[in-house]
Amino acid sequence: MALLGLLLMILDPFRIVRNYIFKPLATLGLAVAEEYKARKERSVNTTKNLFLKLIVVVLVGFSIVWASIFLYLYFYYSYMPSVLHVKDVHLNLRECKNGAEDCQPYPFANVPLTNHQRFLMVGQPYKIMLNLEMPESEHNGKIGMFTVCGTVRDYEEGYIAKSCRMSMLHYKSDLLKTILTIVFAPLLVFGYREQKQHVTVELFSNFLDDSNQPATNIDITIMCPDIQLYSAQLQVVANFTGLRYLMFNWPVLSAIIGITTNLFFILIVCILSWYHWDDTEWITDIRDRYKQIVKGVSQVASIQEKQLTSKGQEETDITPPKWLMDEE
């Protein structure tokens, strides 16, 4: 260092180069370096803030969208009942005990309308139908018309509603039966087709369940003791109207409208909440108002205290001295 100082003194004895060349250049270089460092730090901080804001916006938007979808799905599954309920009907001849005269040995079955819980929604109209699989036999053709009755009961076996409907096999002439047998002979031989018909009997067209007397089972009776059946099924179909009809027949459009509506209201709530909590002036106003109230109360208390003090002094001044009272 001493050698370097000696060389500088020899080369630049009057410090002209050092003061007017090296020092300005060094100062300018340091200023440029500090400015570059500050800009770099500001750009890094700006990038971090932008990245954090972007993450927050994405997370909030993702949460709002999923909240809208969840609300619509919750509303859909709580508002929309099941469309179709199918129950197998196992028919047996009714047992007549003690020779009751009003009892007839008709095919009878008791079908429950519950599956660990009620599946009939209160206020929703239902269509109750009985599907019969009947062979196209000569015996069933001779029976002709037959009556099917359905009686809806509650958990105490109390009567709720009853309906009786008539039905029969679809008529086919002997010539038509012969032609169909010849045409479908290969399928009939190999068992891919059977000579049977599906007869649908609509017992209730617009059944409404009551919350005070809920339906738990239905009694099915076929008023023909010698009818021939392969199987029977009870179908409970929801008859949708109004909003349920739109949501069932146009599910995609209903989902778009419902989710968009939920998204709109949730965004409004979030925006209002953001502006409400972001504006902290109301907290300052409340604090100032509180201070004014406390200050006013303290001032009123001090004024009352001064008034009481002054009244006490006046009473003391008015009271005559004791020696004057004794003389009187």
Image (cartoon, helix red, strand yellow):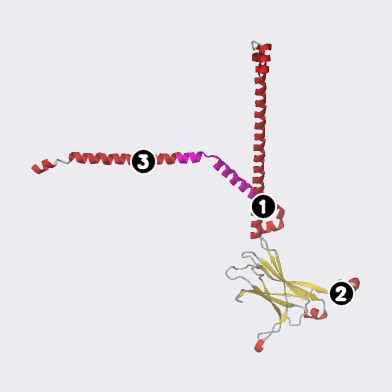
Majority secondary structure of the magenta segment? helix
Distance (Cα) linking label 1 and label 3 = 56 Å
Q: In the rendered structure, which segment of residues is drawn in magenta?
A: 260-287
Q: Amino acid at mark 2?
A: Lys
> Which mark's residue is nearer the viewer, 3 or 2?
3
Residue 116 location, quadrant: bottom right
Q: Which residue is mark 2?
A: 177
Q: Is residue 328 visible?
A: no
Q: Is residue 71 above or below residue 60?
A: below
- Is residue 9 shown above or below 137? above
Q: Position of residue 270 (x, y in %)?
A: 60, 45
Instruction: Pick the quarter of the image with the N terminus.
Output: top right
Can you tell which mark lies on residue 298? 3
Label 2 residue SS: helix
* In the displayed structure image, the side of residue 68 where residue 229 appears, left or right: right
The quarter holding residue 301 reads: top left
